[in-house]
Image: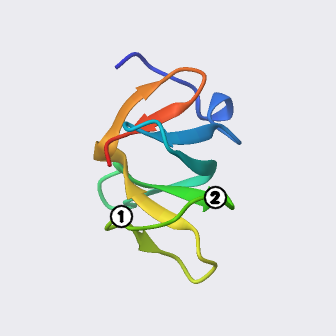
Amino acid sequence: MPEILAENLSGKAVMGSDGAELGMLYNITMDLDTGRLANLVIDPDDTYSGGDDFETDPHGRLLVPVSRVQAVKDHMIIQR
């Protein structure tokens, strides 16, 4: 995957590999010990029905492992 600046990801729509809208990217977490990116923090769309194995934070945002990102273009595409 080519390099992408974090500023270009802020507020990007996130969709599943099945075409379902999941929500908007809120933030990205990282492991401070290794410097590796850990999770996408996604503010779920009103139409998001759940059913995935994604954890949530105390605010109800989805925590999606960065390893599930398949593509970043107009939307971020994640493996569901």
Q: Which mark is residue 47?
A: 2
| Alpha carbon distance from label 1 to label 2 | 14 Å
The figure's colour scheme reads rainbow
Determine whether, in the image, residue 57 is placed left or right of residue 65: right
- The residue carrying pointer 2 sits among few (fewer than 14), some (14 to 19) or many (20 or more) residues within 10 Å by Cα, namely few
Relative to 14, 12 lies left or right? right
Q: Residue furthest bottom?
A: 58
Q: Closest to the observer: 74 or 41?
A: 74
Q: Position of residue 51 (x, y in %)?
A: 38, 67
The residue labelled by disc 1 is 52
Q: Residue at x 64, y 79 (%)?
A: 59
Secondary structure of residue under mark 1:
loop
Q: Mark 2 is on which residue type?
A: Thr
Compared to residue 26, the image places residue 62 above or below, namely below
What kind of residue is marked 1?
Asp
- Badge 1: few (under 14), some or many (20 or more) residues near its Cα, within 10 Å? few
